[in-house]
């Protein structure tokens, strides 16, 4: 099946840093009652150490009771001790052209990265397990708020999107 998904098609919003400069680890997360990370932060329901905060009522029980798919506020929210990566995967592209092209990744740079070469990509095929790191970004900076597009092949990516990918992962 073709898969092209991203914020324009109803995906999660672009991550926004808190005044502390920290990012939520799971963009768009909500607990089982529908409360998001902003609610946990503004109501003091948690601490940066990942514990219940002064606003948490004892009779609510554990924060883990409100987890969704095993993720509670301590794993999702910056205010509750979770910290996201400076580089986050925002879209996987398995396009409609021949052979499922373009195949690519869109990554969002949450905060300035002085040297992208500390990041890399590994892949797995049809659930067969990962062979570990297979490609590393070149040594270059990346500006906060920018997107990086890594394509399997440059020509189909350019044909479909109308611009060249940032990098090619063959």
Image (spheres, helix red, strand yellow):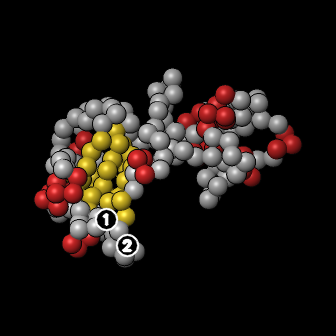
Q: Is residue 170 left or right of residue 110?
A: left
- The x and y percentages for residue 74 are 62, 43
Q: Nearer the viewer, residue 125 or 145?
A: 145
Q: Choose the circle earlier in sequence order: 2 or 1.
A: 2
Closer to the camera in the image, 46 or 146: 146
Nearer the observer, 9 or 17: 9
Give residue 139's quadrant in the image.
Answer: top left
Residue under the point 64% across and 31% down: 41
SS at circle 2: loop
Crowding at mark 1 (Cα within 10 Å: few <14, some 14-19, many 20+): some
Q: How many marks?
A: 2
Above/below status of 166 relative to 131: above
Q: Label 1 near label 2: C-beta < 8 Å?
A: yes
Q: Which mark is residue 1?
A: 2
Q: Position of residue 66 (x, y in %)?
A: 72, 50
Q: Is residue 154 left or right of residue 17?
A: left
**Is any atom of residue 39 visible in this view?**
yes
The image position of residue 97, as x and y in percent, is: 23, 68
Q: Quadrant of residue 5?
A: bottom left
Q: Specify few, some or many for label 2: CA neighbours under 10 Å numbering under 14, 14-19, or 20 or more.
A: few
Answer yes or no: is residue 25 visible.
no
Which residue occupies the extreme right position in the image? Answer: 59
Please name the residue shown 23% across and 73% down the image.
Answer: 99
Q: Which mark identifies residue 14?
A: none
| Quadrant of image for the C terminus | bottom left
Q: Which residue is mark 1?
A: 94
Farthest residue, direction top: 19
User: Is 67 rendered above or below residue 36?
Assistant: below
Q: Position of residue 1 (x, y in %)?
A: 37, 73
Kind of element beneath mark 1:
strand
Which residue does the image show at 37% across and 53% down from the upper left?
91
């Amino acid at each position: 099946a073709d898969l092209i998904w991203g914020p324009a098609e109803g995906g999660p919003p672009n991550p926004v840093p808190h005044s502390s400069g920290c990012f939520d680890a799971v963009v768009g997360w909500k607990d089982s009652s529908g409360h998001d990370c902003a609610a946990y932060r503004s109501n003091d329901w948690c601490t940066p150490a990942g514990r219940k905060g002064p606003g948490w009522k004892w009779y609510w029980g554990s924060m883990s009771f409100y987890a969704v798919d095993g993720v509670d506020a301590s794993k999702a929210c910056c205010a509750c001790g979770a910290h996201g990566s400076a580089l986050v995967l925002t879209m996987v592209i398995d396009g409609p052209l021949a052979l499922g092209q373009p195949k690519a990744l869109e990554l969002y740079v949450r905060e300035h990265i002085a040297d992208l070469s500390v990041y890399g990509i590994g892949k797995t095929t049809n659930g067969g397990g990962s062979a570990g790191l297979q490609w590393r970004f070149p040594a270059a900076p990346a500006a906060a708020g920018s997107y990086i597009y890594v394509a399997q092949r440059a020509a189909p990516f350019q044909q479909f999107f109308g611009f060249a990918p940032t990098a090619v992962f063959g």
